Amino acid sequence: MKIIKIVTLIAIVFACKGSKTVLSNNVLDTDRPKPNVVLILTDDLGWQDVKCYDIDEPSPYETPNIDALSKKGVMFWQAYSPAPTCAPSRCAIMSGNHPARAQKTHVVGGHPPLPYLKDTFRMMDPWYSGRMPENEMTLARAMQNNGYTTGHAGKWHMAVDHKAYPQPEDQGFDYTRSDRGVTKPQKPNRLTDFATDEASDPFRLDENGYPYHQNNEDALNFLRQNKQDPFFLYYATWLVHAPIHTRSKALLEKYCEKLGVDYPTDPGNWPLDGQRNPYYISMVDMMDYYVGQIFNYLETTDDPRWPGHKLVENTYIIFTSDNGGMEGKAEIFTDNYPLDRGKISAMEGGTRVPLIITGPGIEKGVQSDVMVNGLDFYPTILSLTDSKQPKDKSFDGSDISELLLKDPTDPNLVKSQDGDTRTTMMWHFPHGIALESTIRIGDYKLIRNYDSINNPNTESLELYRLYNSEGKKVERVDIEESKNLVNELPEKTKQLNNKLTEMLTEIKASYPYYNSEYNGKLPHKESVPTVLSHENNQSEVTFSFEEHGAKVIKANLIYTSNGGERFEEWFQTPAEVMNTKVKVTLPKGTTHYVINLIDENNYLVSYPLMGQKKRGKKQFYTNALKN
């Protein structure tokens, strides 16, 4: 009896340390090979778009495969994406670096700062990177270094364009496929070109009536071809991102009937609010069906490295989303209620996401209120697979392997870099209409709005209490972010605001600027400086400027080495301000450049002017100075 207890205790200790020798059904598995990892990152799937996360109003969505997965591991109720849009979240997950630290805080990027509509937008985005650096020690590279075969299937979006450099093969993936499958737009519109039973149809319906999806088949092919090795699969589904459509006419009809809405006759925008878009619900249904095929393959396929066992017994599965659901206006996609807002906002609806983690040593059927983040995946996966952390690599997330393997409901098992229990998370989104940074410390969340000066529609600070975790059970208080406590709790507001400043300063975050070209009234707009001239002497450039009451406190050179090329990409470097001149040396290879002056009132002046931001691709070299 004592021997059995000692063996069980040893197994528990190994499990908690993330060793490849883990506890399974209270038996010490000394012959278990290196575990596999499947990371499934869905696209724009909201917290309330998965049936098992359904609270308050009953959801019409059907996700039986994901619901079943939630009962095989840990389902997190307070999981967050690193950012409220896809590209920064993807880069953060793959690099382990906070979006603000990486200067990768929004999609696309890599262009000069410029205003949106001059009549509407008082502020403009800062410069931000268009991609993850090509020399980044990614999670994929770390897994390669530890003997894993690495695979990517689906969306990439970690460069200025889906097909721009660097691609997955440049960032540590042995296998990569990016076919969009069923998400390719239907032509001429979404009420035509449905999948059929025809043998020649590239989306031919399967035995269950679902269209063939090449994206999912690519993920399955990686598993089939590499199951004999320890593998890491990053499956980035194209579903459920826009365009909102479904190639399954049967699903569209099914959900029209379930919702009690007429079958659409106009392929245009869907106007009904809430979770009542039959196109979108059909996409969620298809996404669940396809990832269900991944789960089924792992559950039914023998493990070549572990005779007598199935692949799933030695595979960690992480299922989540890159950001919250998109809440449209003319085209209503989904509704994140009770969470406020959605994608492109750092409010709860834009950053809270579904997260389910299963695998060897992880207890089944656990629901956790511990606060976790996509930034945690990199260090956690290394620990779960007993992989070495790359030299000189630091993480902005936490290793949550002890939480997973010991007690997924104990927040004290998640440690920050200083060894203390992690209680704080921060998001930075200085873009678009949102223009905000947010911080959560324990039960409280603070929002800092940057466009608040002389703006009656926007408070500078908002404070909400999301939960009450002081008792034995975590109680929901205001996840709707509806009751601003700034005036009631001034000390708490000050505490969170000071901590937010501290974190943003440490991470060297960039902030939005007031738009000197804004057509409306703004304080101090008449005081912005003017650039008078420039002189380029063998790449040593001097700009002369005139102040009109506001002092120039900073200048940045914005430059490109491939102006006019298909994937034109711009970078930023500081310039030297001296009295009424700015001097800078153009980096080697510069083809075009722009200077940005920032004055003491936080206005940005661009020379030359860069026009205004519009939807779609745009090249900026035509407005810039040529080297």
Image (spheres, rainbow, N blue to C red):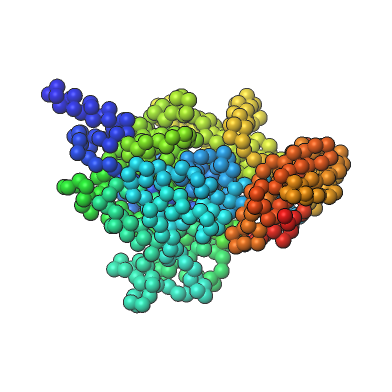
Rendered view: 180 above or below 428: below
Residue nearer the viewer, 193 or 306: 306
Q: Which of 74 and 157 is in front in this view?
A: 157
Within the image, what quadrant is residue 316 found in? Answer: top left
Q: In which quarter of the image is the C terminus?
A: bottom right
x then y, percent, for residue 43: 47, 54
Q: Which of 444 and 161 is in front in this view?
A: 161
Q: Residue 153 location, x and y as percent?
A: 40, 56
| Residue at the (22%, 37%) spot, across then down | 24
Q: Residue 243: percent from the left, percent from the top?
A: 52, 63
- Asked if one can make out residue 332 in the rendered structure from this viewpoint, the answer is yes
Report whether 465 appears left or right of 55.
right
Q: Quadrant of residue 330?
A: bottom right
- Where does the N terminus fall, quadrant-wise? top left
Measuring 47% from the left and 34% from the top, which residue is drawn there?
392
Identify whether 97 is placed above or below 120: above
